[in-house]
Image: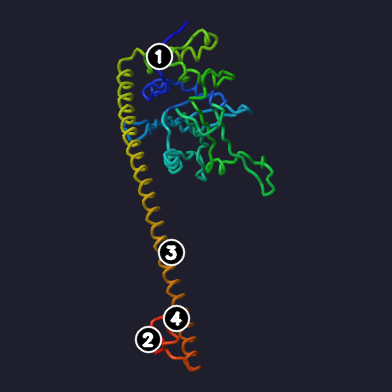
Amino acid sequence: MIVHIANPIYDSVFKYIMEDERIAKTVLSALLKKEVLHVTMRPHEYANTSRDTLSMFRIDFAATVCEEDGSQQVILIELQKTWLDTETLRFRQYLGVQYSNKNNIQVDSKKGYAYPMVAVYLLGHCVGDIPDPVIYVNHKAYNYDGQEVSKGMPNPFVESLTHNSIIVQIPLLRGQVNNRLEKVLSVFDQSKKNTRDAQVLNIDETCYQDDADIMYLIHRLTAAAADADVRTDMNVEDEYFSAIEDRDTAIMKKDQELKQRESELKQKESEIKQKDQDLKQKDEDLKQKDEDLKLKDLMLKAMVNAMIEKGMSIQDISLLVNKDVAFLEELIK
């Protein structure tokens, strides 16, 4: 059966579902590939309350996870979502805030160790040519010889200074359901957008009948689609991004015009340089001709003086070299 759910790519919808602890546990467990026993949204939530040049939705979670050995550990999850191409500097600045936040230090740690942190990026765009919809970037320790150091790891000191990352490329989901995570993320699949309303996805809920947690998520998204406040917030986002697109289109046109002008200026500069080079070449040619003439005059002067010394008259020399007498007299002064 096809049901219409609110599109969770919208910040307002995403916040609506992630405020529900059961859904947050479902999504985060799938992302971490670990059972999340308990999760709370941190009090210093960084979800966008005002708009800037790009949409950057942020939520912090503190999650208690069950490790493979059965032990429990508290980790911080810094979740950032954007549906526009985003400068990595914005992500780095946010992480910098988290590293410097004293509230992220373990209360019972005498040495000031921080809670382990995982950064999750839900991207509405692709990262280069990477074909996988989900990428795990996990740090490891190596010795000088390049061998992995496993003894004593994980270490709280190392965990305080490094973090793992999970990058989700939403455009690459497109019907891929090969594992638990892709099944959960399939509700973000933008290829399922309603042709008449981009705020709605068409989901076949029969594909999830065997999974109570995802069915709960779908029901929450169905409720969001019918929630007047959520719909209003989605309309605001659409208006905002429409304004951004109009602005970006205008900027692109101006950039193209500037590039065209720059190209024309470069062409003119190139032509001017070529003319300058031509003038320099002409000057050099004239200088060379002048030097050649001076050399010829010196040779003629020497020849005339030699003829005079042999007793020839200046008139006879004039006839011989085909030069005026006045010119020759001036030459040998």
**Of the image marks 4 and 1, the number of the one nearer the N terminus:** 1
Q: Are marks 3 and 4 in contact (CB under 8 Å)?
A: no
Residue 223 in view, yes or no: yes
CB under 8 Å between callouts 2 and 3?
no
Q: Amino acid at mark 4?
A: Asp
Marks 3/4: CA distance?
Answer: 24 Å
Foreground: disc 4 or disc 1: 4
Circles 3 and 1: CB distance less than 8 Å?
no
Q: How many marks?
A: 4
Q: Earlier in the sequence, mark 3 or mark 4?
A: 3
Q: Earlier in the sequence, mark 1 or mark 2?
A: 1
Residue type, label 2:
Glu
Residue hosting label 4: 297
Q: Amino acid at mark 3?
A: Gln
Quadrant of residue 45 within the rendered picture: top left
Which type of secondary structure does the marked residue at label 1 adopt? loop
The residue indicated by pointer 2 is: 330
Work out whether residue 101 can be spotted: no
Give the number of the disc on residue 195.
1
Disc 3 or disc 4, which is closer to the eye? 4
Residue 83 higher or lower than 162, as above or below = above
Image quadrant where one finds the C terminus: bottom left
**Is there CB contact under 8 Å for labels 4 and 2?**
no
Q: Which residue bears the numbered disc 3?
A: 281
Residue 199 in picture, x, y percent from top left: 37, 18
Left or right: 50 in relation to 130? left
Q: Secondary structure at mark 3?
A: helix
Residue at the image point whose x is 41% and y is 80% from the top:
323
247 left or right of 218 in image: left
Spatial CA span between label 2 and label 3: 32 Å
Of circles 2 and 3, the one toward us is 2
Distance Cα–Cα, label 4 vs label 2: 11 Å
